[in-house]
Image (spheres, rainbow, N blue to C red):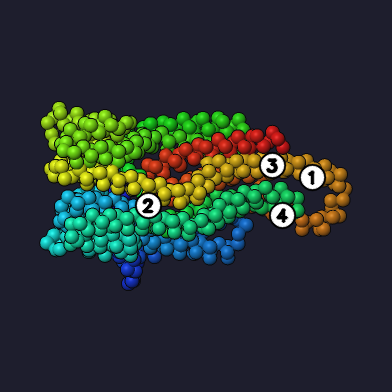
Amino acid sequence: MAGAARVRRAIRLQRIARTLAEWYPGDVEPTDDLHRSLAFLGSDLRADTVVRAGYVAAVPVAVLALCALVALLPVLPVAASVPAAAGIGLGATHVVHRLPVAAATLRRARALGDAPSLVARAALRLRLDSTPERAAIFAARTGTGPLARSLAAHAERTRSGPSAGLDAFAAEWRSWFPALERSIALLSAAVEAPPDEREQALERALETVLDGARTEMAEFAGDVRGPASGIYAFGVLLPLALVGVLPAARAGGVTIPASVFVVLYDVLLPVGLVGAGAWLLLRRPIAIAPPRVTAAHPDVPSEPTRGVVAGVLGVAFGFVCGSAVASWAAPVAAVGTGVGAALVVHYRPMAAVRRDVSAVEAGLADATAVVGRRVGAGEAVETAIESAAGATTGRTSDLFEAASGVQRRLRVGVRAAFLGEHGALRDIPSRRARATASLLAVAAAEGRPAGGTLVRLADHLTELRRVEEEARRELAAITGTLGHTAALFAPLVGGATVAMATQMAASEATTGSSASTAGASASTAGASTTGATTSLAATGVPGVATLDPSTLGAAVGVYVLALAAVLTVVATGLDRGLDRSLVGYRTGLALLAATATYLVAYQGAAMLF
């Protein structure tokens, strides 16, 4: 179902691109990068079609931008609005041209996260049978994603070759992950090595790809610390600090029109954060992605009814709570609570499935080690699986117990017990568990010699989990700061700052009213002298509205919600990759937390001030 939805979206985008491209009759020269990206994505679009569509898209975007600038920023001269609209149109052209490249980059990073697992599967298969063809096919068939499909395609094209497509596969991915090529080269060398040296070569192949993953993530973490700090400083701290000086600016005779403030905080800053966040995500070399859970899973409701109902209830609840704080807070709270509740309820079942998968994978290495030791001692794999169920705990024990029960009741082999129609992994979308089950099935056919291989598999699973944890620790300081800022810090500071600015504006208005009454007799004589320091609203300039407390609170509230969404997406993408269900669930939680924190901070600060 989810795959069909993605296909429908891709078809719609392709139809739009072809329609736009028909309006550009000139010749274009697409870049090689665009050609490669479209081929990697498997798109039916031609690169020249995308380039033409980008050029044509600039015209309607520029027209819409010009209309928006004239309507939202009446203080901006038309002579300045036209170049700004043209720049936005050119920006749209650049986005269209780079969008396939960005999509391919993100997908490639996600694919490379499976490189250590793929090499581990190939190495383990070579331990049982030093045939490159079987190792390549096994590693490809037991994996999913672009990396496994690429290996399968190369293995099919060079089935009779000495390396079974491994060398061509490594050459294809060389420029994005050099350690993969070195690791594959060691696998190929291990095939020709003497039996007493083969084990060491295979171990070195896995160590090479694991060390490469560690190095890539460590370098990336070091490279993004500066840009992430810049996002934090210029996207969060500085804008919120400027809100606090607005009353002082008014006291000095400087008044910011409401339209300028709203466009700056609710349009330009969020767009800038999106661009900066995308820049960070596109530079991630490897994304160790979580298991993909879709609406096709039996534990996930196929209809969005629950999310829609939760969203409606969240809007009503937020409107009531916001109205109790301030009139301007009602729509802000309604949007934040409604969207947050809808996302959390819709993606919560998927999050529960993902936690279940993590629980299964947590004990997978221990269970595999038990099976390997018993098989090495002469026990059959089928009975060793039942022993592993008793030797482990939690969800992993349940998995092996279920597989053992399927074997007994249906009289089937190991592969069917785990991966069959009624297998134990039927509703567990774990690539790692499925690859392990495939190797258990191979071990069942090989017998006692496979015991040592299964023990090594357990060590590899442990090492893979350790690499994943190290990668996340490298980025923990960055992702933690972004996540906490999105959900707590930014709304806390924003709410307190708005409350302080509101109270200062009210005090200033009271003082100004008394002063104007006392000096009413001299107002006419001094009009020409004070006109330069009065606000635009006071001078009577038409079409300009000053920034009142209601506008300030609502504008900063929208900005806080935008921060909660954008920073959470960036933090999740850096941590786990842009998985839609995980991003949606965490964004929903961040919106709920940000909305509540913003209102509580405003109310608490208003009581103190």
Tags 4 and 1 touching, CB below 8 Å: no
Callout 1 crowding tier (Cα within 10 Å): few <14, some 14–19, many ≥20: few
Q: Nearer the viewer, mark 1 or mark 3?
A: 3
- Tell which circle, 3 or 4, labels the residue nearer the N-terminal end: 4
Q: CA distance from mark 4 to mark 1?
A: 15 Å
Q: Nearer the viewer, mark 2 or mark 3?
A: 2
Residue 103 falls in which quadrant of the image? Answer: bottom left
Q: Secondary structure at mark 4?
A: loop
Q: Going by the image, does 369 lie left or right of 260?
A: left
Q: Going by the image, does 344 lie left or right of 303?
A: right
Question: Which residue bears the numbered disc 4?
Answer: 254
Q: Is residue 588 above or below residue 47?
A: above
Q: CA distance from mark 2 to mark 1?
A: 58 Å
Q: Secondary structure at mark 3?
A: helix
Tags 3 and 4 touching, CB below 8 Å: no
Q: Amino acid at mark 3?
A: Met
